[in-house]
Image (tube, rainbow, N blue to C red):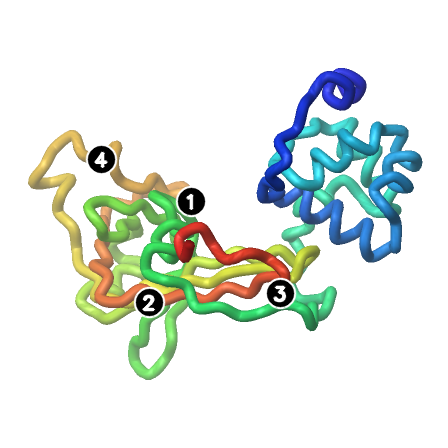
Amino acid sequence: MFAAASSGTQHSPRRARPGDLGRRITHRREELGLSVEELAERAGMAPAFLEWVETRPADLGTSGVARIAAALGTSRQELMGGTQGAPPGRGGPDRRAVLAELTDEECRSRLGTQGVGRVVFEMGGTLVVRPVNYRVVDGSFLFRTQPGGALAAAVGRRVVLEVDRLDEVLSHGWSVLVAGSAERDRRDVDRPGTRREEPQPWADGPRELLVRIHPARITGREIRPGDEPASPDRA
């Protein structure tokens, strides 16, 4: 696989934006003070192929990632960003990183059409925080919960949906806040057959209460390497 990729591929002179795997490899290689050629020799790969991996989104497969990880003195799990069971921030900050405000379009792009976040609201002087998996339908954020559960108390209140992503290896991450009012959504009653448009809760048990958050405000911030170009949304 490596020989075919390195010997017959003609690369465009335009430098593409790397994928997460390529950025982690570059970060670790530079941390060790290795050149592309030195890492390629350690991993038994062609330098041109390794440069391609670092500069473009790539799917190497298990064996390819394992070879590069061994050459870098790290694990395949680390390179793939899979050490998410541990709390973030143990690696310390990257002083070269910069903090940037996200535009509304950038926030919505990161939220996507579905995902996992945390709903936060106040009840009786106490903040209630619960994880949910949401789906975006007609600009609103939907989630399902138990009619008598803690999240049911969010209906009729102002809430915040927080969604974020962190990559400790690259000291990179973003956080988006969706502020609005939570209301009961009756689309499954008034429009039979729309259930396929809704989020399907990960937790088992009945989740018959459909809640809609109509966003009054969406804000976000992102921390990124100081030498990373601005998002295409800002171009």
Q: Is residue 199 above or below residue 131?
A: above
**Residue drawn at 71 percent across, 48 percent down:** 24
Whole-Å distance between the Cαs marked 1 and 4? 17 Å
Whole-Å distance between the Cαs marked 3 and 2? 29 Å
Q: Which residue is mark 4?
A: 195
Looking at marks 1 and 3 on the same chain, the residue that comes earlier in the sequence is marked by: 1
Mark 1 or 3, closer to the camera? 3
Return the x and y of residue 100 as percentages of the image width and height. 49, 68
Q: Is residue 95 left or right of residue 101?
A: right
At label 4, which amino acid type do we have?
Answer: Arg
At label 3, which amino acid type do we have?
Answer: Gly
Mark 4 or 3, closer to the camera? 3
**Residue drawn at 30 percent across, 50 percent down:** 143
Mark 1 or 2, closer to the camera? 2
Whole-Å distance between the Cαs marked 4 and 2? 24 Å
Q: Is residue 151 above or below residue 133?
A: below
Q: Which SS class for mark 3?
A: loop
10 Å neighbourhood of mark 2: few (<14), some, or many (≥20)?
A: many
Res 38 quadrant in image = top right
Residue 150 visible: no
